[in-house]
Amino acid sequence: MFALNFVSPYHEELLRARIKNVTIRLGDVRNEYPENSVVWITFGKKLAQKKKLYTAFIDKVYVKKFSQLTAEDLIHQNPEITSAEKLIEFFEKLYNHKITPEDLVSVIYFSEVVRGE
């Protein structure tokens, strides 16, 4: 099984509150996270213990340029990031290198898998 891991405590809060249902990842990650896959949503730093928050289904994966991100993509990723430019600034800090509006990202929409009754 695959995992979508998150490291920001703020993202952990959004995930636990079920507000965040999109993750935007640098590059084309469709092979790593194919549509219709079941994944664990986890939280934890790289090379450290992870917490499994819940199981999710990957509904859709779009590959776009930063400049093509929509308001819907951004609001479900992080309500505090309201423009592609702000997301670029965030990613530049995260990845520690220059990013342009022409760089590709994968927009992964996911939904929680709950027990049926």
Image (spheres, helix red, strand yellow):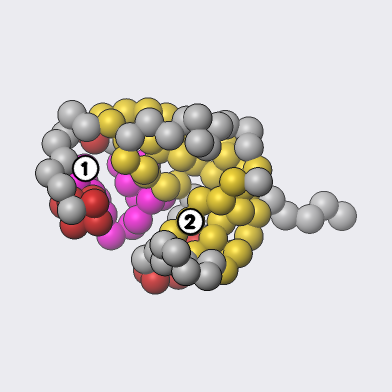
Q: Quadrant of residue 85?
A: top left
Residue 9 percent coordinates (x, y): 39, 71
> How many numbered circles are shown?
2
Circle nearer the N terminus (2, 1): 2
Residue 98 percent coordinates (x, y): 12, 44
Q: Which residues are magenta?
A: 71-88
Whether residue 70 is visible, yes or no, is no
| Extreme residue toward the front, this view | 47
| Extreme residue toward the right, this view | 117
5 or 11: which is nearer to us?
A: 5
Report the residue at 57% width, 36% height from top. Answer: 59
Q: Using the image, tell me which numbered label, if any, was put on residue 5.
A: 2
42 or 74: which is nearer to us?
A: 42
Q: Using the image, tell me which numbered label, if any, was put on residue 84.
A: 1
Q: Check the image and report above or below for 65 versus 58.
A: above
Residue 75 percent coordinates (x, y): 35, 50
Q: Quadrant of residue 103?
A: top left
Residue type beneath disc 1: Ala
Mark 2 vs mark 1, CA separation in Å: 22 Å
Whether residue 91 is visible, yes or no, is yes
Q: Check the image and report above or below for 42 versus 1.
A: below
Disc 1 residue crowd, few under 14, some 14–19, many 20+, Cα 10 Å: some
Q: Secondary structure at mark 1?
A: helix
Residue 7 percent coordinates (x, y): 40, 64
Disc 2 residue crowd, few under 14, some 14–19, many 20+, Cα 10 Å: many
